[in-house]
């Protein structure tokens, strides 16, 4: 749906994006990750045609990105802003019309979303009178009121309380289910773990990694296994031999143990199961995958070590 | 509705939704009219009602002053000296404002004292002096010669040296008109400056509250800048129309109520209407107001585009209001330059510098109005039109450049 091909961009001789290529498939939730200053906002602004690349191309649904595509793209920027003197409904209609909707269509869509979020009571409130969370919600609606095919969300969860975080997360999932392609730029790695299908990690303008979330986590797995069993701890330890190292152990109930193991050499989870089958009663065994937070830190740390 | 129109309409709605706009719409003309009334009244001091008592112990004047007395100054005579304390405190003299003391030898020593209770206006002093002096001149002429009073005055009168421009031998381009034109031109710069600040502040606000990032995902920066200039410019024009309408009504009302005698020659004193009230005559009689208003609108629009682009760029380059104040200073100097250029051109109209400043977009609105108000000849009017073309061309060029600067600056937070 969105294809970024060898994009480069400099500001006053400082390279902020260096030969970056990314592909976002239709209907995907794509995490655009990276520390501050990685070039995420620059890339997002290019997708919104606020900036032009120095080199490379951007494609929308197989076509070179053009101004006419903007009406199919929704954007929630990290730094939110609304006209404080305008009323909620009028403001949303104004923004929807700027995205190419007729006034009638804009009004209908705005009313639908106000009802959907159960905030019809706010329709005639001035933006200045809304709390930060309320304003965030209005902005979220503003990003999708014109029913975009691609929705770019930059830190969509910041400023929301846990209840509203849940609400927005569910809304993002629902949009995905309806076929909307979502690009999610966030530092909230829990949300990436939870809702993203794919992710790309940018660091200092370069692309460090791009893959499905599962592959990224598996690639960075550290060979740790979680085991819960009933039986004797000594028998369990003996069964590990030299193939697995016991990292930690915990006895949540009498004769019930939870242990963390580190695989040594080329051993697998199957090898461990075979070793344990006559020794203890295994209740749960799992090869632990790192969280996206750990993948993120791992990749950045590796890159910084390489640079040093 | 196009995006440009949407943005422009929103800009207009926001301005019209502000109480400040409506206060300014009403208060502006009221203040201008009040100032005008104050000026006219100040220039009209000669018409203050005065009761003048002439103490004439020698009965020199024979209880007579002018054949036609000034209707606002009423003269009464006593044939004796009057103590000042008595005049000041005596019940019989309480209604008199002025005491003119003519000593018995006044025709020889030519000295008379005028005592007043409250300060007299300039015109009242001139009028009083004029009327008493004319009567005394009659008496002097009769006492010392066989000449008629009129011949005596003719002999007495000094020769007037009237300096005139060779290019304007009939003195059609009057200096007072030039000043009136200057005021109109300065008014353009004032209005442009006032609403230019609104453009600046609106741009800074959009940038600092980050709505600009949402907007730029839908419209081009140049579109955003132009719509802002157009929206605020239209509001400024609307306010200007309101001002013109209210001021016109105000002028008519003033003419029909407070200044009814302006067009009535029977009320003119010595020297014609200018003598009576030069300012009111200038405003109501000498300026071609419809002609000037038409040009005012055209120059206003061109100047607004020119300065509006500059203010928008400064707003885009500023990250906060306070930050922008530094950038504004040079722009205020430029506006001030236009005003000083106007003053210079009134005093030195035919210098090379004045000619150059006629075409400079920063000063041309003021200089053009000085020329127009003086009653432009064909060649002078051609110069005005040329300066308008230069101003418009500069505005368009600046808008193009400003669009780029605006685009490069607006997303730098």
Image (cartoon, grey):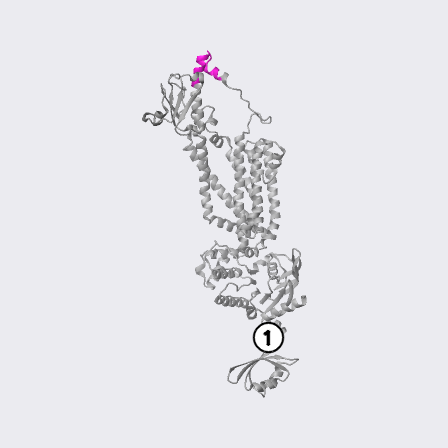
Q: What residue do we see at 58% from left, 36% from top?
A: B341
Query: Mostly what secondary structure, the magenta segment?
Result: helix
Q: Is residue B148 magenta?
A: yes
> Horizontal and vertical percent for residue A14?
65, 58
> Horizontal and vertical percent for residue A77?
55, 60
Asked which secondary structure carries label 1, the reply is loop
Most extreme residue toward the bottom, as rendered?
A: A278
Q: What residue do we see at 49% from left, 56% from top?
A: A91
> Horizontal and vertical percent for residue B41?
43, 32
Q: Quadrant of residue B52?
A: top left
Using the image, determine if residue B166 lies above or below residue B108. below
What residue range appears in magenta? B135-153
Q: Quadrant of the C terminus of chain A?
A: bottom right
Q: In terms of depth relative to the viewer, which is nearer, A289 or B217? A: A289
- Chain bearing mark 1: A
Q: Is residue B170 magenta?
A: no
From the viewer's perspective, tell me whether residue B380 is left or right of residue B45: right
Please give the residue where the numbered disc 1 appears in the rendered image: A289
> Horizontal and vertical percent for residue B200?
54, 48
Using the image, determine if residue A225 lies above or below residue B206. below
Q: In terms of depth relative to the viewer, which is nearer, A39 or A301? A: A301
Q: Quadrant of the N terminus of chain A?
A: bottom right
From the viewer's perspective, tell me whether residue B404 is left or right of residue B49: right
Using the image, determine if residue A122 lies above or below residue B166. below
Q: In terms of depth relative to the viewer, which is nearer, B114 or B161? A: B114
Determine if residue B233 is in view: no
Q: Quadrant of residue B81?
A: top left
């Amino acid at each position: 749906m969105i294809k970024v091909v060898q994009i480069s961009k400099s500001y006053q001789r400082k390279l902020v994006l260096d030969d970056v290529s990314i592909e976002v498939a239709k209907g995907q939730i794509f995490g655009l990750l990276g520390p501050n200053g990685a070039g995420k906002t620059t890339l997002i602004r290019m997708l919104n045609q606020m900036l032009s690349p120095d080199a490379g191309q951007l494609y929308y649904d197989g076509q070179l990105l053009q101004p006419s595509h903007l009406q199919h793209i929704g954007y929630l920027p990290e730094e939110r802003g609304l006209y404080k003197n305008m009323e909620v409904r009028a403001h949303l209609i104004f923004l929807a019309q700027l995205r190419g909707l007729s006034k009638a269509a804009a009004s209908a869509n705005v009313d639908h979303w106000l009802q959907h979020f159960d905030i019809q009571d706010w329709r005639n409130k001035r933006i200045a009178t809304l709390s930060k969370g309320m304003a965030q919600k209005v902005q979220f609606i503003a990003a999708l009121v014109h029913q975009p095919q691609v929705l770019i969300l930059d830190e969509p969860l910041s400023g929301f309380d846990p209840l509203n975080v849940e609400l927005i997360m569910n809304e993002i999932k629902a949009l995905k289910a309806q076929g909307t392609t979502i690009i999610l730029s966030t530092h909230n790695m829990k949300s990436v773990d939870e809702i993203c299908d794919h992710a790309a990690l940018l660091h200092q303008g370069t692309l460090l990694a791009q893959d499905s979330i599962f592959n990224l986590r598996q690639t960075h797995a550290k060979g740790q296994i979680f085991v819960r069993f009933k039986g004797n701890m000594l028998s369990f330890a003996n069964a590990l031999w030299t193939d697995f190292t016991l990292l930690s152990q915990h006895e949540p109930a009498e004769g019930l143990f939870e242990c963390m193991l580190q695989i040594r050499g080329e051993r697998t989870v199957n090898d461990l199961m075979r070793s344990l089958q006559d020794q203890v009663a295994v209740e749960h065994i799992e090869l632990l995958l790192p969280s996206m937070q750990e993948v993120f830190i791992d990749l950045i740390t590796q890159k910084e070590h390489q640079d040093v | 509705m196009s995006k440009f129109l949407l943005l422009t309409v929103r800009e207009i709605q926001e301005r019209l939704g502000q109480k400040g706009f409506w206060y300014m719409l009403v208060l502006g003309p009221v203040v201008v009219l009040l100032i005008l009334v104050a000026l006219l009244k100040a220039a009209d001091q000669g018409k203050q009602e005065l009761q003048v008592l002439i103490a004439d112990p020698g009965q020199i004047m024979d209880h007579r002053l002018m054949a036609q007395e000034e209707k606002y100054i009423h003269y009464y005579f006593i044939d004796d000296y009057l103590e000042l304390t008595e005049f000041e405190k005596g019940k019989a003299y309480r209604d008199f404002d002025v005491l003119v003391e003519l000593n018995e030898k006044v025709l020889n020593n030519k000295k008379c004292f005028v005592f007043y209770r409250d300060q007299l206006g300039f015109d009242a002093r001139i009028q009083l002096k004029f009327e008493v002096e004319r009567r005394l001149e009659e008496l002097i002429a009769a006492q010392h010669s066989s000449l008629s009073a009129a011949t005596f005055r003719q002999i007495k009168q000094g020769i007037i040296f009237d300096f005139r421009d060779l290019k304007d031998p009939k003195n059609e381009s009057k200096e007072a008109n030039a000043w009136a034109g200057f005021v109109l031109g300065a008014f353009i710069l004032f209005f442009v400056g006032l609403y230019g600040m609104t453009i600046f502040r609106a741009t800074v606000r959009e940038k600092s509250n980050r709505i600009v990032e949402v907007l730029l995902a839908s419209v081009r920066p140049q579109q955003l800048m132009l719509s802002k200039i157009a929206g605020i410019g239209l509001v400024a024009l609307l306010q200007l129309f309101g001002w013109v309408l209210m001021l016109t009504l105000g002028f008519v009302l003033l003419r029909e109520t407070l200044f009814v005698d302006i067009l009535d020659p029977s009320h003119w004193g010595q020297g014609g209407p200018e003598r009576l009230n030069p300012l009111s005559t200038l405003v109501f009689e000498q300026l071609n107001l419809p002609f000037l208003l038409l040009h005012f609108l055209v120059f206003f629009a061109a100047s607004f585009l020119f300065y509006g682009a500059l203010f928008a760029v400064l707003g885009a380059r500023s990250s906060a209001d306070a930050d922008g104040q530094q950038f504004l200073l040079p722009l205020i100097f430029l506006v001030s330059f236009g005003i000083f250029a106007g003053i210079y051109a009134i005093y030195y109209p035919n210098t090379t510098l004045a000619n150059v400043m006629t075409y400079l977009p920063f000063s041309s609105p003021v200089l053009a109005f000085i020329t127009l108000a003086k009653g432009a000849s064909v060649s002078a009017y051609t110069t005005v039109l040329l300066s308008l073309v230069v101003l418009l061309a500069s505005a368009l060029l600046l808008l193009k450049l400003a669009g780029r600067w605006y685009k490069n600056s607006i997303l730098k937070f």
